[in-house]
Image (cartoon, rainbow, N blue to C red):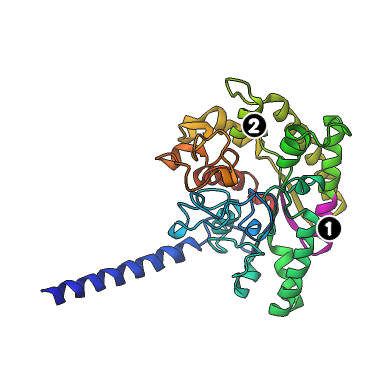
């Protein structure tokens, strides 16, 4: 009887393993219908914590999250350094395109060479277009992210040859997410730039820095650039707590600044599109869909949008959101995981909205 029980236990484990393989392979099937002649071989990411897949794990900074409860819903509950409970936009976009189900961090010491052709993230949580922004928290500036990208290109050339490498870069999708920390932290919270700029001239400065970065990517072979605008930073729980008064309302001055940067950024991208007609440089509006979720949470299935799931949800971020901080019981009922970053469900809804609206603009 015991022998028979062991036999069935082994069989059950085998069937579970086979089922898992089928599910895993299904994750890598494209969910978006692309034109017949279009190939998207890779997804790359540059910028800040929204697309940092764990690079900050290997940087001397306090802006880290490679510990519980981060990653509690990731495969096997592993905290990878992604600022969420599960996956983040690069993973979700890569899955939708049928490339792979998780985009790794370039600085991961365990990065496998066979991951390189399908894309990696160079982003660093806390970074921004303003060179002062990453210095505030000792993270990787965009200029250094470019240097890592050059190093990556050398490795890719060695792996697949120069012609195939050029194809991957020209046809891959580059996600660029930055600007939030410039507006919310460098300008407002820490006031580093207030003595030098009013908000209008600071927006010009940020956009000029952003434009230079896009052009450097173009020179290195990138042709499909998805540039994410600044979200409504005045509505993230952290900023509500610091500057939203006793009721913790959205900070309108912060949101207005984000909209100003976005307007100027969109105009600059239109100009670059004319300068580089062989490229697809597109502005992605994340302000509008995220603000709509915050204002109409029930429409999207959320119960709480003004606090994060971690701890009190008002200030917990990075090391303040740790294994001693209790988390909400239903992760999917919260828009934000910590006081700054969305949950997997929040990211998933945003990515779906973005792809539905913009995917055809890249092909």
Secondary structure under the numbered disc 2 in the rendered image: helix
Residue that extends furthest to the front in the rendered view of this protein: 324
Which residues fall within the magenta stretch? Answer: 212-227
- Residue 328: x, y in percent? 43, 39
Q: Position of residue 181 (x, y in %)?
A: 72, 41
Label of residue 278 in the image:
none
Please provide percent x and percent y for residue 208.
86, 44
Which image quadrant: the C terminus?
Answer: bottom right
Is residue 15 located in the magenta-colored stretch of the structure?
A: no
Whether residue 339 appears in this view of the structure is yes
User: Residue 236 appears in which quarter of the rendering?
Assistant: top right
Quick one: label 2, few (<14), some, or many (20+) residues within 10 Å? many
Residue appearing at x 44%, y 64% in the figure: 24
Q: Judge whether 74 appears above or below 271 on screen.
A: below
Q: Which mark is residue 239?
A: 2
Position of residue 318 in the picture relative to residue 45 (left or right): left
Residue at the image point whose x is 63% and y is 62% from the top: 105
Q: CA distance from mark 2 to mark 1?
A: 32 Å
Residue labelled with disc 1? 216
Of residues 107 and 97, the one nearer the viewer is 107
- Residue sitting at 47 percent across and 45 percent down? 324
Q: Is residue 11 left or right of residue 182?
A: left
Horizontal and vertical percent position of residue 293: 55, 33
> Where, by quadrant of the figure, is residue 38 drawn?
bottom right
The answer to whether 325 is drawn above or below residue 46 in the figure is: above
Q: Look at the image and say whether residue 221 sits in the magenta stretch.
A: yes
The mark that comes first in sequence, 2 or 1, is: 1
Task: Judge depth for marks 2 and 1 and give the one in front.
Answer: 2
């Amino acid at each position: 009887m015991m022998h028979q029980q062991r036999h069935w236990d082994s069989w059950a484990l085998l069937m579970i393993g086979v089922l898992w393989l089928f599910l895993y392979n299904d994750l890598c099937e494209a969910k978006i219908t692309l034109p017949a002649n279009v190939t998207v071989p890779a997804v790359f990411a540059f910028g800040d914590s929204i697309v940092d897949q764990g690079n900050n794990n290997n940087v001397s900074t306090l802006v880290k999250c490679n510990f519980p409860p981060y990653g509690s819903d990731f495969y096997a509950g592993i905290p990878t350094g992604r600022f969420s409970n599960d996956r983040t936009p690069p993973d979700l976009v890569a899955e939708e395109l049928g490339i792979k189900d998780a985009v790794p961090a370039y600085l991961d010491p365990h990065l496998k060479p066979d991951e390189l052709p399908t894309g990696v993230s160079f982003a660093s949580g806390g970074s921004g277009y303003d060179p002062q922004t990453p210095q505030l928290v000792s993270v990787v500036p965009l200029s250094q992210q470019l240097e890592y990208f050059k190093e990556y290109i050398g490795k890719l050339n060695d792996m697949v040859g120069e012609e195939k490498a050029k194809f991957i870069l020209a046809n891959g999708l580059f996600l660029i997410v930055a600007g939030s920390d410039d507006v919310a932290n460098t300008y407002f919270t820490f006031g580093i730039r207030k003595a030098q700029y009013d908000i209008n001239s600071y927006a010009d400065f940020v956009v000029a820095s952003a434009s230079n970065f896009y052009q450097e990517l173009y020179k290195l072979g990138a042709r499909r650039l998805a540039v994410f605008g600044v979200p409504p930073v005045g509505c993230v729980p952290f900023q509500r707590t610091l500057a939203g008064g006793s009721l913790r309302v959205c900070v309108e001055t912060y949101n207005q600044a984000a909209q100003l940067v976005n307007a100027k950024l969109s105009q600059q991208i239109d100009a670059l599109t004319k300068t580089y007609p062989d490229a697809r440089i597109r502005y992605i509006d994340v302000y509008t869909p995220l603000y709509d979720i915050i204002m109409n949470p029930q429409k999207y299935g959320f119960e709480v949008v003004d606090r994060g799931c971690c701890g009190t949800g008002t200030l917990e971020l990075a090391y303040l959101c740790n294994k001693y901080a209790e988390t909400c019981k239903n992760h999917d009922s919260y828009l934000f995981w910590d006081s700054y970053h969305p949950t997997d469900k929040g990211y998933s809804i945003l990515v779906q909205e973005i792809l539905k609206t913009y995917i055809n603009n890249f092909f």
